[in-house]
Amino acid sequence: MRKAKYICFEGTEGVGKTTQTQKLVDYLRGKGYSVLQTKEPGTPLCPLTMQLRAIMLDKQYDDVLTAPARELISQAIRSIHLERVVYPALNEYDFIVQDRGIVSGIAYGTACGNDDEVIEMLVDFVVPRDMINHDALYDKIIYLRGNASRGLKVAKAAKQEYAAGDAMESRGETFINQASRNMDRACDAMNATVIEVDGKNIEQVFSDILNALQLKENE
């Protein structure tokens, strides 16, 4: 049985995934645990995935990429990430904490026009069978759910990763709300823990996360 507890944060733009991922990593390391911090699609831990991420998400390529082409790049990133970064870490770390994963892939991939059954087939193809633990890849999925339109405005106001803009954010509120509905369904199917973020500050959300993970601030 693998050593690491594999935790994945999900949510649409601007709900605080990156902030809460970092807070959890800092908290766990402060408790003396060894933690691998990573993300999808694309992680600095594997530079090739960042190059593929740019092709997939840089708006300058948006007019050229087809929906299937974007999805295949997404799955290529996942395959490299899981086999070259996550798999070796499963027995080396106490925790693996990840910003985005399969749920986001399904939610955005279907919003882009791909069939969900095709995406799920590709996920089954790229996820190594010996990484599955108790019938699931992740030990815990934390879904930070908030108003998708409001979150999109927050994300657009932040520093942009690409000069031409983000291909997903540039599609606007109708797209992001569809991705949010898709994410609701995917999270339900994958037994994610839902944490509502609207009306809460960062510390309140983090307290909910610790409770969901059965980690107490005073332990």
Image (cartoon, helix red, strand yellow):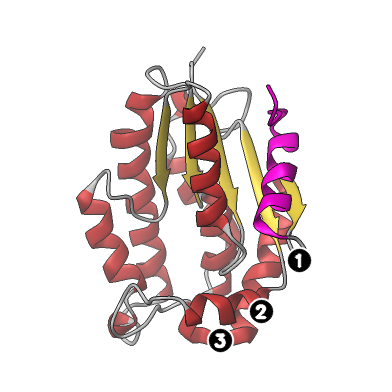
**Mark 3 — residue?**
172
Q: Give the range drawn in magenta.
A: 201-219
To which residue does mark 1 refer? 198
On screen, residue 47 above or below 34: below
Q: Spatial distance from mark 2 to mark 3, Cα to Cα?
A: 11 Å
Residue assigned mark 2:
150
In the rendered image, residue 80, in percent from the top left (x then y), is placed at 30, 43
Mark 2 residue crowding within 10 angstroms, few (<14) / some (14–19) / many (20+): some
The tag earlier along the polypeptide, 1 or 3, is: 3
> Residue, x 37% and y 18% (percent of image)?
92
* Type of amino acid under label 3: Gly
**Circle 3 residues within 10 Å: few <14, some 14–19, many ≥20:** few
Across and down, in percent, residue 213 comes to 69, 32
**Mark 1 element type:** loop
Quadrant including the C terminus = top right
Find residue 8 and name its label.
Answer: none
Horizontal arrangement in the rendering, residue 109 relative to residue 163 (left or right): right
Residue 192 visible in the picture: no
Q: In this view, does 88 lie to the left or right of 190?
A: left
Whether 102 is drawn above or below 55: the answer is above
Above or below, comparing residue 102 to residue 152 in the picture: above
